[in-house]
Image (spheres, helix red, strand yellow):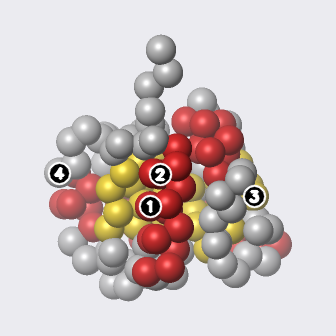
Amino acid sequence: MYQQPVVLYVEDEERSRKVMRMIASDMGLSTVTIFENSQDFLPRALALDPRPDVIFLDIHMKPFTGFEMLEMLRQTPQYEHTPIVAMTASVMNEEVQQLRTAGFDGCLAKPLDMDTFPESLNRIVMGEQIWRIFS
């Protein structure tokens, strides 16, 4: 039997959070946690139970950016091998290289595409890197 992935989404933009909630509902995902800001990010991430199978990080956040949150997670044994995907509305080729170099396991453009996200999520959970930078 297929087990639904546990998802953490860190996003400060209300519209993007609404899209994620709609997609999660359509997919029947029962465990999606959404952080509306990155304040106290690491303690909140470590407190999650069950632990996320995949983490989506908005790049342009405060007080911690997606890059800073990624670094925190990669230095934590619980999350060092968890797929972590960047979420951003502005992706240029040089930015994609920065995301790859930083250690992200992929990047999805915002706004999320309701038609392609379910397949992308499944592929990410299966260990594939997805770099879907055009919406």
Q: Are marks 3 and 4 in contact (CB under 8 Å)?
A: no
Residue corresponding to mark 4: 47
Between label 1 and label 4, give the one nearer the viewer.
1
- Secondary-structure class at tag 3: strand
Q: Which mark is residue 21?
A: 1
Q: Which mark is residue 24?
A: 2
Image side of residue 47 versus residue 83, left or right: left
Q: Can residue 95 be seen at all in this image of the molecule?
A: yes
Residue corresponding to mark 3: 132
- Secondary-structure class at tag 4: loop
Question: Looking at the image, is 7 positioned above or below residue 70?
Answer: above
Dot 2 alpha-carbon crowd within 10 angstroms: few under 14, some 14 to 19, many 20 or more: some
Report the residue that reaches farthest toward the front: 26
Question: Looking at the image, is 86 positioned above or below residue 2?
Answer: below
Instruction: Pick whichever, 68 or 35, lies toward us.
Output: 35
* Mark 3 to mark 2 CA distance (whole Å): 19 Å
Name the residue located 43 percent from the left edge and 43 percent from the top edge: 29
Q: Are marks 3 and 2 in contact (CB under 8 Å)?
A: no
